[in-house]
Image (cartoon, helix red, strand yellow):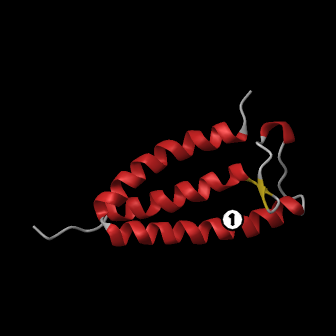
Amino acid sequence: MTTYALLALGVLIPVAAVSLVVLVRAGRVVLLSAFAAVGVLLVATAVFDSVIVATGIVGYDGSRILGLRIGAAPIEDFAYPLAAGLALPALWWLLRPRGRA
């Protein structure tokens, strides 16, 4: 049986691995900026996901979640902002304009 955790980890692990390699190569400033962005995203996710879960806008099958929650949001919900918070700065750095030829 597929769980939300397996789906989330299936996204998070490869995205985070590649993104962290790129961010480390980009340097300390880029890496620390990405970590700061991830922190903001995780706090925002805790607030807004708790609201949408508590109000019933979004629901989860209780047999498919780990049961750990931050506020009302299942812990699995935090994999996606974590992946995005690492991947987007890594892509930004990879796709930045380089010196002119």
Give percent across and percent down for residue 95: 32, 61
What is the three-letter code of the residue carrying label 1? Thr
Give 59 or 32, whichever is nearer the viewer.
Answer: 32
In the image, taking residue 9 as reference, residue 97 lies left or right, namely left
In the image, taking residue 15 as reference, residue 69 lies left or right, namely right
Give percent across and percent down for residue 90: 39, 60
State how many labels appear. Answer: 1
Which residue extends farthest right?
A: 55
Residue at point 47%, 59% (across, down): 86
Give percent across and percent down for residue 44: 67, 70
Callout 1 crowding tier (Cα within 10 Å): few <14, some 14–19, many ≥20: some
Q: Quadrant of residue 20?
A: bottom left
Residue at point 69%, 49% (across, down): 76
In the image, taking residue 25 as reference, residue 14 lies left or right, namely right
Give 90 or 36, whichever is nearer the viewer.
Answer: 36
Residue at point 59%, 72% (across, down): 40
Q: In the image, is residue 24 above or below residue 62?
A: below
Residue at point 68%, 41% (across, down): 5
Which residue in the protein does label 1 denote?
45
The quadrant in which the N terminus is found is: top right
Give percent across and percent down for residue 101: 9, 67
SS state under label 1: helix
Which residue extends farthest left?
A: 101
